Image (cartoon, helix red, strand yellow):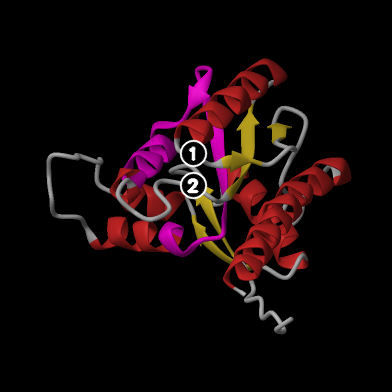
Amino acid sequence: MKSLEFRRPLVVGIGGTTRPASSTERALRLALLGAESEGARTQLFGGAFLHSLPHYAPEHSERSEAQLQLIEAVREADAVIIATPGYHGGVSGLVKNALDTLEELRNDERPYLDGRAVGCVVTAYGWQGSGAVLTSLRSIVHALRGWPTPFGAAVNTLETRFDAVDTCSDPKVTDELARVGRQAAGFALAFSARHALARD
């Protein structure tokens, strides 16, 4: 059998709020660190970037530079991690607009998020909102043909604080976020190995 060469998988993180260094974006960074611990490359599209995205309008053929950057990154990605705050029981408009922009992948060989593991992270001020939004986010991932990782992280920011860019007040939450990243990267490696074997 020929020796197989596996490239390091790319995990793209999408999430944040309009507030700089938000809890959502910090949680996403911790999840991406988990992916990096499994050998993955990562790329972050945080709150400031998402805020720069125009509202997605499918009837318009021209796309902004920011939209094209997001589309191309996800097109190349082996896995994705999505982090959203829970707003009134649902995904934030900022994150939803970024996901709507992925409609541009509809005619790809891998349409939307097909063939990609997708980690889900939700931050909310209380447990009721975080659980409901995590379920909603998973449903959106299914609609985009993605594979939600078995473990999704729900962070109650009423009890948990992110003190610095890569630290959290609760070690258990830190581990849970890292687990999301590790699972996303692990599934990406498995998909890559399967495709490499199919080509061999």
Q: CA distance from mark 2 to mark 1?
A: 5 Å
Closer to us: 30 or 137:
137
**Quick check: 71 left or right of 80?**
left
**Which residues lie in the magenta part?**
74-102
Residue type, label 2: Asp
Residue 91: x, y in percent? Answer: 49, 29
Residue appearing at x 55%, y 30% in the figure:
137
Kindly check if marks 2 and 1 are in contact, taking CB atoms under 8 A apart as contact: yes
The answer to which quarter of the image holds residue 120 is top right
Q: Residues within 10 Å of mark 1 (few under 14, many from 20)?
A: some
**Quick check: 125 left or right of 137?**
right
Return the residue at label 2.
114
Magenta span has 97? yes
Residue 145 marker? 1
The answer to which quarter of the image holds residue 49 is bottom left
The answer to which quarter of the image holds residue 150 is top right
Classify mark 1: helix, strand or loop. Answer: loop
Residue appearing at x 38%, y 55% in the figure:
109
Residue appearing at x 70%, y 84% in the figure:
2
Indicate whether 69 appears above or below 184.
below
Farthest residue toward the front?
Answer: 1
Q: Earlier in the sequence, mark 2 or mark 1?
A: 2
Magenta span has 112? no
Indicate whether 136 appears above or below 178.
above
Classify mark 2: helix, strand or loop. Answer: loop
User: Does the image show residue 165?
Assistant: no
Closer to us: 14 or 40:
40
Residue type, label 1: Arg
Indicate whether 10 appears above or below 123.
below
Residue 94: x, y in percent? Answer: 40, 38
Residue 81: x, y in percent? Answer: 59, 49
Residue appearing at x 73%, y 70% in the figure:
39
